[in-house]
Amino acid sequence: EAQVTQNPRYLITVTGKKLTVTCSQNMNHEYMSWYRQDPGLGLRQIYYSMNVEVTDKGDVPEGYKVSRKEKRNFPLILESPSPNQTSLYFCASWGQGASRLFFGSGTQLSVL
Amino acid sequence: GENVEQHPSTLSVQEGDSAVIKCTYSDSASNYFPWYKQELGKGPQLIIDIRSNVGEKKDQRIAVTLNKTAKHFSLHITETQPEDSAVYFCAASIGDDKIIFGKGTRLHILP
């Protein structure tokens, strides 16, 4: 079954404690991306990757890091989380060009 | 920068009536326009998409129309049902490989 798997589903942490949200896809997609969803703001892109070792900033990259060492995995790293990063996060993947995005089930992050 | 405007932000319709959500985009080079549905507790899922060489596309109760001259596209849901209650996002392609989203419409189907 084609899917994007992200973990964990829920995460509560404290300010400054480094965390990683994992994302994996089984469709051999070239493109992967992270979004955050906040009320009234829709889906905003954090970072995206066009292929292994190729990443670029989205619209709201401050405070986040990503890596793409393998085609299937695209972890999101918060080196020093702050309360304004409390949000619902989605990972997505897609094939070449502008095409259908496949989303994970989301990670609800709370930074206290 | 490029953006996609989506209206309304909230829409309530009586079960069985039609719902229409409208979007405008800024990049005249955009050529792919998907619509996503997000149910509670889930990630967005594609429900229909249209490319710029087509003016209208229909899939059962769902249809999308595109007006490239006006840079405007719309989602139409007919004979609405309770399971249509969700958040809907329109999106438009930017360049060869990027998609930007509207801010979403929360659709309520009233019994």
Image (cartoon, coloured by chain):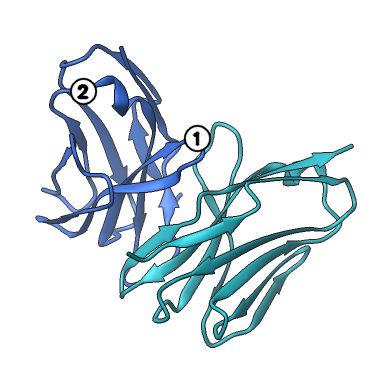
Tell me which amino acid carries mark 1. Answer: Pro
Report which residue position mark 2 lands on. A81
- Asked if residue A58 lies left or right of residue B93, the reply is left
Tell me which amino acid carries mark 2. Answer: Pro
Does residue B52 lie above or below B4 as drawn? below
Q: Is mark 1 on a helix, strand or loop?
A: loop
Residue B75 lies, in percent from the top left, at: 67, 64
Q: Could you say which is closer to the camera, residue B110 or residue A105?
A: B110
Q: Chain coloured blue: which letter? A: A
Q: Could you say which is closer to the camera, residue A69 or residue B104?
A: B104
Q: Quadrant of the C terminus of chain B?
A: top right
Residue for point 78% across, 63% down: B61
Q: Quadrant of the N terminus of chain B?
A: bottom left
Report which residue position mark 1 lands on. A39
- Asked if residue A66 lies left or right of residue B89, the reply is left
Residue A99 visible to an observer of this rendering: no
Residue B56 lies, in percent from the top left, at: 67, 80
Sequence-first disc among 1 and 2: 1
- Asked if residue A80 lies left or right of residue A95, the reply is left
Q: Colour of chain B?
A: cyan
Residue A59 visible to an observer of this rendering: yes
Residue B105 lies, in percent from the top left, at: 62, 48
